[in-house]
Amino acid sequence: MDNMTLIADVLLSLDYKVIQATDGEQGVQKAISERPDLILMDLSLPRLDGWKATRQIKAHSDLRQIPIIALTAHAMMGDRERALEAGCDDYLPKPINLRDLANKLEKHLKGTST
């Protein structure tokens, strides 16, 4: 089972609505059309990587308030700062710790509906 499927299954079991994208271009388009409460962004996406997709989403005036949490295998020194510079609001290295994910979701979704 890949990370996206695992995370989607966990989120669905917690009664979150899940919208998935298979690449960065599709992610940007779905952010525009769906206006999600939060985006979990893999930084190593095909076609348009997560760094660039995040920049495009945050450059869009109607989307910049949506929190973006980077989910990434990029866990070397400086990668967290680089993700934040790209516009991510938070950072979670892979392998994903589900408790850490739940804490970050709670932190960023306070006051929004799921």
Image (tube, grey):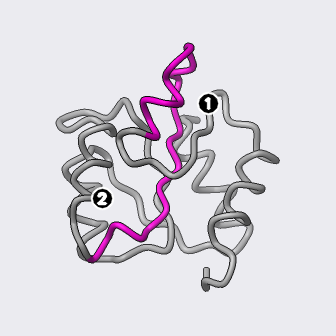
Give the labeled residue for mark 1.
Answer: 93
Image position, residue 66 (x, y; %): 43, 68
Q: How crowded is mark 1: few (under 14 residues within 10 Å), some or many (20 or more)?
A: some
Image position, residue 46 (x, y; %): 25, 33
The answer to whether residue 111 is above or below residue 103 is below
Query: Left or right: 110 with respect to 71?
Result: right
> Alpha carbon of mark 1 to alpha carbon of mark 2: how far?
21 Å
Residue ranking furthest to the top: 76
Foreground of the two, 93 or 88: 88
The answer to whether residue 107 is above or below residue 41 is below
**Residue drawn at the location 64% of the way across and 66% of the way down:** 12
Give the labeled residue for mark 2.
Answer: 58
Of the residues shown, which amino acid type is indicated by label 1?
Pro
**Residue drawn at the location 34% of the way across and 54% of the way down:** 21
Q: How crowded is mark 2: few (under 14 residues within 10 Å), some or many (20 or more)?
A: many
Foreground of the two, 29 or 21: 29
The image quadrant of residue 76 is top right
Q: In which quarter of the image is the C terminus?
A: bottom right
Which residue range is magenta in the image? Answer: 62-84
Q: In which quarter of the image is the N terminus?
A: top right
Instruction: Look at the numbered disc 1 and give the secondary structure of its residue.
Output: strand
Image position, residue 103 (x, y; %): 77, 55
Q: Do the residues labelled 1 and 2 touch (CB within 8 Å)?
A: no
**Residue drawn at the location 35% of the way across and 77% of the way down:** 35
Of the residues shown, which amino acid type is indicated by label 2?
Lys
**Residue drawn at the location 57% of the way across and 55% of the way down:** 8
Image position, residue 75 (x, y; %): 57, 20
Indicate which label's residue lies in the foreground, 1 or 2: 2
